[in-house]
Image (spheres, coloured by chain):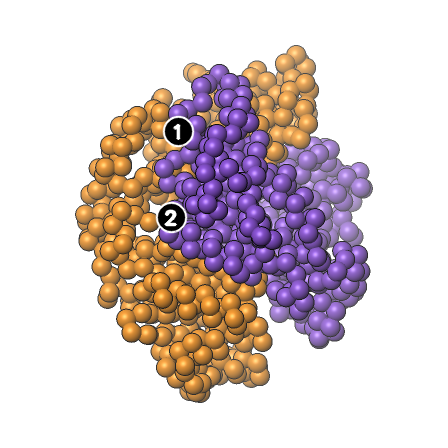
Chain colours: A orange, B purple
Amino acid sequence: MFKDDKNLLQAEIIAIGNEVISGLIQDTNGRYLSKQLHLLGINVPRITAVGDDKGSISEVVEGALERVDIVIITGGLGSTHDDITKEVLAQIFNSKMILDHKVRRMLEVSFKKRSQEVPKNVRSQYEVPVDATILYNEKGTAPGFFFKRDEKKLFSLPGVPLEMEHLFDAYVRPDLKKIQKGVIGHRIIKTVGLTEASLWEKFGPVERLERLVTVASLPSYLEVKIRLSYCAESLEEVEIRLGEAEVMVMASVGKWVYGKDNDSLEGIVGKLLKDKGRTLAVGESCTGGLIGHRLTQEPGSSRYFLEDIVAYSNEAKTSRLEVSSALIQKHGAVSAEVALSMAEGIRKTSGADIGLSVTGVAGPGASNNKPTGTVFIGISEERRSNFEEFRFYNDRRRNKERSAQAALELLRRWLMNY
Amino acid sequence: MFKDDKNLLQAEIIAIGNEVISGLIQDTNGRYLSKQLHLLGINVPRITAVGDDKGSISEVVEGALERVDIVIITGGLGSTHDDITKEVLAQIFNSKMILDHKVRRMLEVSFKKRSQEVPKNVRSQYEVPVDATILYNEKGTAPGFFFKRDEKKLFSLPGVPLEMEHLFDAYVRPDLKKIQKGVIGHRIIKTVGLTEASLWEKFGPVERLERLVTVASLPSYLEVKIRLSYCAESLEEVEIRLGEAEVMVMASVGKWVYGKDNDSLEGIVGKLLKDKGRTLAVGESCTGGLIGHRLTQEPGSSRYFLEDIVAYSNEAKTSRLEVSSALIQKHGAVSAEVALSMAEGIRKTSGADIGLSVTGVAGPGASNNKPTGTVFIGISEERRSNFEEFRFYNDRRRNKERSAQAALELLRRWLMNY
């Protein structure tokens, strides 16, 4: 919610279904819809998930219709006995059910394509509340519905994300665009390598930033995101203001900023490698392949990513990466010396310009007298090399993730010549 | 919600934070808590997400306290100005703020370890509502709170998942165990290799299963989960009934079942390798390291997982995996022949008992005349080998995930001698 948000249109989102409240599935529709509504300048003060229960649905929907201008419901429109959204809405809007011939025709055509008759239970989809506008669904069997009460709008959409998004695009967004009063814009600045506290300490007094935009920071064990938000009448105004705020952030903590909005660290590193015409090979141990997996999430990564050796055993470190067994014996497999040797080994044997390596103890339990979370990262080019030591205090999975993140960040700084 | 759930204790979950309702982050706490409460026989009819707004929080919390026996709140306990949960709760419960010396001591010790003073803004954490029981947080700076009103219980936990889970384990679960009235049990049966429709076709009429338990199936692009649910007075009754239902499922589609509940495919494969005393090495291409990453998520995987070569370039396939360039030239890097040669190459050069390989086109775009989603998986042992061909129709990320899943499933069947 933002300073001026009381002047904006307000919407609530309601997710219906036992599968959501019982924890069987993660509802992602709420997040999707909230983002879309913000882009239309509509504020979302509340998202509610409720089961397939007539009384609860009715109470939540009636409450939302009292509080806000727009209500968007997802789920409960299927054809099994626990799908009761349509029935509850018909009651709320005091609307009789009638047969809709277009829904019927669409279903018949769709099943005919697969040489099937329309199954009996699906026929209940033909019935629609007479006071609703039908949102015909080309991507599934359940149509959506639009109801109006005075100036309030209610959209009921299927719960399957693909169908929900389809009907939002086809009906909801065009309709809401007509009543759009402003734009809420966000910019996410993504930082890595500093804790939330040190980040703001380096930034200095946050008030000067807060005079421009609404500020939120979101720490996780991998990175800290700063969200800048602004709400104005036009997208242009929003963009200008967010741009000013971004410049202020970059001026003080830009060194720790790897990207913004939808950027990923592996995407930024990939772009740097491509721009500089360098190739990369990776030698991993405790991360088990995660660095290679992340680097290859980017389309076109084959242009700079040559290979990745996950040398989990000491034998593999020796045979594949030319790390001498004497070195391993002397310093242990988890050591700066072995990390550097792995980075050099993968670079030389692969023929890549840059070699990147990770060796560490993911846990649980110590290994070779090194405690869980001890991680060394090495990087090697023809004329220079470097290593960093980390001590993470997490479980196996997070230690792997933090190690991969630290390795990609070291590579980014290396390529930026920091 | 289940047949007898009106007799059970009822709880609502409330997630507080602008980051949740604006779509900046996906709230996963609601799902976690709902699962945990079910295990305690507590039904969750509603989950609400609400912003950092005093009026909204107050309204949602008061409403929940009227409707249900137990309210669990997550988020809004940090030390920045938009964290107002503590303040709102103090108002609702008409409770003054006092200084808590244990919170103070814990924070001082924790910052001292890092040779830092407690930052000014964090000091607000010392203040706690006098009527609350403090839930001391060893994993973060914000303590949680427990309030009671008549027979109703309210727990307020931090929003950071790690801290939330810690306080749930330490305080909430032990407390709720004391008032537990029944048990809602779920069993998830995890299948791979069949679509949802073919799975139920092979199963036959589902009614016989539904007479025993509540049934839900949850398809994704990687696998289909079947959830069996039952609610009774004792865990024993629940377990017996779920066991009967599980036997019925296994009898008809057991071949496609790789595990249940918290089992992961990589965990099951790891267990099979360990039990049979075999070692594994992997040669990946389009999956980029994802198979190695998944295999090494398991603690102790170093016992059977020797190494993984991500041979992204053709040169790496030749130099590392001894795939002849003539073979690549003749059949293309994405072919059954190359997959088999990669599997044999990684097995021989690593000295592992089993070699597993993947080569494919993750996309976007075709490669060497092979359309996006074409994937070959190879497996090699000393006396036998095999391959499978797949055609996935997804985007790059999903194609990678489906390929890794298919490879691990082929390995599982191989080890099961199917």
Residue at x-position 70% and y-position 71%: B210
Question: Percent from the top left, x then y, of residue A196?
Answer: 41, 30
Foreground residue among A403 and A230: A230
Q: Which amino acid, by three-letter code, is at mark 2?
A: Lys
Q: Earlier in the sequence, mark 2 or mark 1?
A: 2
Q: Which amino acid, by three-letter code, is at mark 1?
A: Asn
SS class of the residue under badge 2? helix
SS class of the residue under badge 1? helix
Foreground residue among B233 and B412: B233
Residue marked by disc 1? B121
- Would you place residue A15 above or below residue A110 in this image? above
Q: CA distance from mark 2 to mark 1?
A: 20 Å
Side of A404 where A13 appears, left or right: left
- Would you place residue A45 above or below residue B120 in this image? below
Residue marked by disc 2? B54
Foreground residue among A278 and B270: B270
Question: Percent from the top left, x then y, of residue B231?
Answer: 70, 62
Do tag 2 and tag 1 residues touch (Cβ < 8 Å)?
Answer: no
